[in-house]
Image (cartoon, rainbow, N blue to C red):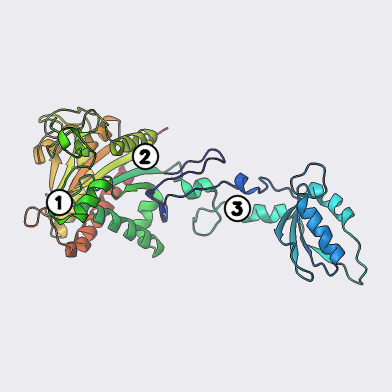
Amino acid sequence: FIQLDTCWPPVSTMSVKVNSAFASVLLAFGLLLPCQLGLPTTTNQGDRLIVFVPTRQAQLDWLELIHSQAGKPGEVGENVRFWFGPGLLNQETIVFVPGGDYGRLVAAIPSSQDTYSWWTVQKENLGKLVTGETRRSSDISSAYRTYQEIGDDLPSKRIVWIDAGIHAREWIAPATALYFIDKIVQGYKSSDSTIKSMLDNFAFYIAPLLNPDGYVYSYTFTRERLWRKTRSAQAGGCYGVDLNRNFGYHWGGQGSSSDPCDENFRGSSAFSEPETRAVRDKLLAIRLRTISFITMHSYGQDWMVPYGYAYNVSVDNYAQMMRPVQAAADKLKSLGRNYDIGNSAVVTYPAAGASDDYAASIGVPYAHTIELPDTGQYRFLLPQSEIPRVGLETLEALKVYLGYIAAANQPRDE
């Protein structure tokens, strides 16, 4: 997620974020602020736009001179900005002139020997026009937005975090996250009232693939289709860490292993891996606004709540967390899919160092692990043809879940 405070250096990042009506996929490239482009940062009410049409070489030469004076203190053209040109004879040159420089520039314009003026003011009081072009509007699709509005969510919105693909072999999870992104964007554009309400109430931070190295390894090598961990080099010639045992809440406990060759290897220390550190750092930065944390896995058809690091422990607001989960499970059942719900350790098994436990431990009110279909027929090898059904079911369940949260909660104070 992008945050720019200065003109330099360019920011390189890659993330997926749905903000109001948009899903912005921010790819790795340098982003420049206006000050890097040499653009004026303020516009006064006396600013003007002048169009020149030089018909004589002397006029064109004068435009070239003014163009060369840009940024030079004391020169007539110091603050003048050429929007187009200078080019050729009989071709328009369009010039922006700040209000305080207009008189000096006009006084320096060579007089025309023709019966007509070779320049004209195209726009008077340009500042008023600019002010009108940046009027505030509640409709994000009908007004020019600030950089912060385009790059960041509105600060009044509560955040819903969704991640997937923390385990390489669980392919249905990233596929479902991408389905969700696509459908809520398309739904907003087509005026789906439920989706519009979701996006008006929440800012979505979505990371569809938390373990890219492991996923690529699983995807590329058929014999390693069931690879689970990352691909970082470990002791003894082994590879990978189970990222869902690497978070720092009760790290090193039940359901994790100290053996680098085991599937549940927890890493050398809590947050030893760059992937978990990235999640931790972002969650800490947004935790006061984050109302829901959802991590998608497979398989099992479970919708669970913390804590899962051991038996017989649960979050203080367990009943609160379970209410929207029950509503979502009822919706899934109406669609022909039965989900088990409840405490993570009870529904499945104890697993210390998990991401949902960590999210709950830093104060996120609703934290969940969703184990997507199926229940054992295909296990991790769910056919690709099942993506639309699983995606649709999950979308409909999340509509109900988020609708409940929106109705039951007020924004949290910073």
Q: Determine whether label 1 and label 2 are within 8 Å by CB.
A: no
User: Of helix, strand and loop, which one carries label 2?
Assistant: loop
Q: Which residue is mark 1?
A: 224
Q: Determine whether label 2 and label 3 are within 8 Å by CB.
A: no
Q: Which residue is mark 3?
A: 135
Of 367 and 91, the residue lying toward us? 91
Question: Three-letter amino acid code at disc 3?
Answer: Arg
Image coords of residue 57 (percent x, y):
85, 66
Judge the density around disc 2: few (<14), some (14-19), many (≥20) Cα neighbours within 10 Å. few
Q: Nearer the viewer, mark 2 or mark 3?
A: 3
Q: Does 95 appear above or below 251? A: below
Find the distance from the CA under tag 1 to the CA under tag 2.
46 Å
The earlier-in-sequence mark between 1 and 2 is: 1
Image coords of residue 273 (percent x, y):
27, 35
Of 366 and 268, the residue lying toward us? 268
Q: Which residue is mark 2?
A: 410
The earlier-in-sequence mark between 1 and 3 is: 3
Find the distance from the CA under tag 2 to the CA under tag 3.
28 Å
Q: Determine whether label 1 and label 3 are within 8 Å by CB.
A: no
